[in-house]
Amino acid sequence: MGPLLDNATVLMGNSPRFEIYGCDFGLGVTAARCGFANKFDGKVTSYRGLTGIGSVMLEPCSTEFCPSQDE
């Protein structure tokens, strides 16, 4: 994704229609994570927070803390 992005690029994606915390598959407490794919320096992924409307969970990525590109 390097050639497509510069220091001023902002990407937004996802669907607010999917109720991530409302689905109960019988596996315990749900945690939203984006995994190893699409990790790059400066990426911040946001999810709706556990307490409902108005709360936000942020998942920042920095090459200092996410060296997954070396894997």
Image (spheres, helix red, strand yellow):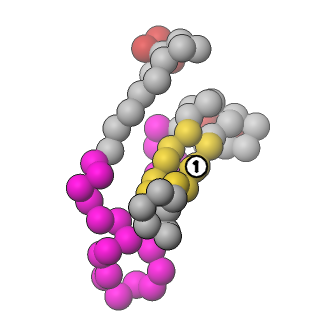
Q: Secondary structure at mark 1?
A: strand
Which span of residues is magenta-colored?
Answer: 15-38
The image shows residue 3 at horizontal and vertical percentages of 47, 11
Question: Which residue is situated farthest in the front direction here?
Answer: 54
- Image side of residue 47 versus residue 57, left or right: left
What predominant SS class does the magenta segment belong to? loop
Q: Residue at point 49% right, 69% down?
A: 50
Quadrant placement of the N terminus: top left
The image shows residue 5 at horizontal and vertical percentages of 48, 16
Disc 1 residue type?
Glu
Q: Can residue 21 be found in the magenta stretch? A: yes
Q: Is residue 37 above or below residue 30?
A: above
Q: Nearer the viewer, residue 18 or 37?
A: 18
Q: Residue at point 23% right, 55% down?
A: 17
Question: Which residue is situated farthest in the left direction here?
Answer: 17
Q: Can residue 42 be found in the magenta stretch? A: no
